[in-house]
Amino acid sequence: MWTGTTTAEYISKEAIAGSDVVLTIDANLQKITENALASNIQKIASGGFGKAYDAKGGACVVMNVNSGEILAMASCPDYNPSDFVGGISQSAWNGYTNNEAKPLVDKAVQNSYSPGSTFKMITAIAGLESGAINLNTRINDTGIYTKYKDYQPRCWVYNDYHVGHGYLNVSGAIEKSCNYFFYETADRMGIDNLVRFAKYFGLGGKTGVELQGETSGVLASKENRAKLHNNAPWSAGHTLQAAIGQGDNEFSPVQMAKYISMLANGGKKIKPTIVKTIRNADGSEASREEINKFVKLKLGIEDEETEDIAINNSYLNAILQGMKSVTSDTSGTAYVRFKDFNISVGGKTGSAEAPGNKVHAWFVGFAPFENPEIAIVVMVENGGHGNYTAEVVRDIMAEYFGMNTQNVEEDMSAQAYVQSFN
């Protein structure tokens, strides 16, 4: 018989099964999204589109336009999660933190960027809804906007060709990304109308996606200018810059995906989410109200306080037609990327000036045009031209719609593309 001294006692207890969180992410689409984004950044950096830009990072979001479910979301460069198992080594940690491309930052959610011309659909909606313009309004782009002596911005086409676009309506202005048209529209309606509609589409506020560290971004406004610039006053020039997605405007890719989804779904509000459901051990499922309440509490998110606005369908259709022309008309700024594509796509390029002489490249799109299902937003830091990033969207759409990608012929030759800030 063995005897001894009791040093400790414990009571064993049978483990209780937890709940399963079911994500909205599509594994195959996620893989394609990550690969397409990384390949695109590499192609831009190596001069694969004709001119090389020092592109090192970017982000992409794929969203269901009706539900707000995020089907894929990528941030590049990323990191290897296994490096953190058991404690990350000092050398690996230094490698991540010293990398100027910031692989530990989720660029889709935690970073915000000037949207450039991808913002112009907001200016168009605000102009139409406020009565500053109508569907028959034609504005003559003469190249240089000369209404104000102290600030006379130019349309991108003037910078490249020393001409203006001439007379354009709202659809044509979106197709050709005419800065002048949107300068005049914003000047007529004023910044407050622009802010009102930008807020409705979720820009400048957290989306409430179930992830830590989401940025609110910044919406260019009189109030935010005063906060950010030591009570600096607002001027007409700031309104002109805001109209084309510059100035203080900075939004995250997930905010932009919400905005484009709302354009595509007829202006209906949605809430971006990566949680499809939560299944409890007893077989029951948590309600959406329970999930939202828990997320708000954990992340400190407040309820969205934006007014309900019914967007006029005829206005929205005119804007969407302009977006379709971007990809389907020979003069569209992304036609070269979609000319052989089997799915009808609405899209918009954007090349946004950023500090350090950088130009962030955006492409936003949705498909199918006739009955939209998904919206895709891609942004490449210092990617040069929004036209370049459209390839990412095309490749993701080919996967989503089950197309035989062998029939989607990609022209790998370098093509000159001179449009500057579109």
Image (cartoon, grey):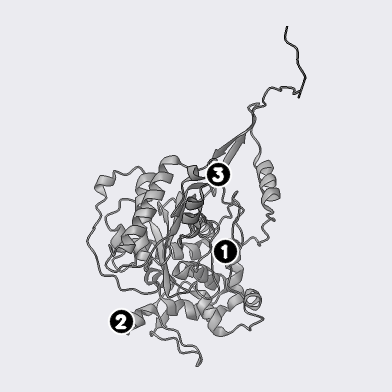
Point 66% across, 75% down: residue: 227
Q: Residues within 10 Å of mark 1 (few under 14, many from 20)?
A: many
Q: Is residue 195 visible?
A: yes
* Label 3 neighbour load within 10 Å: few <14, some 14-19, many 20+: few
Q: Nearer the viewer, mark 3 or mark 2?
A: 3
Question: Please, what secondary structure does the residue beneath circle 2 have?
Answer: helix
Residue in the picture at 30% in, 81% down: 161
The disc labelled 3 sits on which kind of residue? Gly
**Residue 229 point in image, percent of width and height:** 62, 79
Q: Are marks 1 and 2 in contact (CB under 8 Å)?
A: no
At a point 39% along the width and 54% down the height, the residue shown is 37
Quick one: SS at disc 1? loop
> Which residue is labeled 2 in the image?
161
Q: Are marks 3 and 2 in contact (CB under 8 Å)?
A: no
Marks 3 and 2 sit apart, C-alpha to C-alpha, by 57 Å
Mark 3 element type: loop
Q: Earlier in the sequence, mark 3 or mark 2?
A: 3
Residue 182 x, y percent position in the rendering? 47, 76
Q: Nearer the viewer, mark 3 or mark 1?
A: 3
Residue 420 drawn at (x, y percent):
36, 74
Residue for badge 1: 203
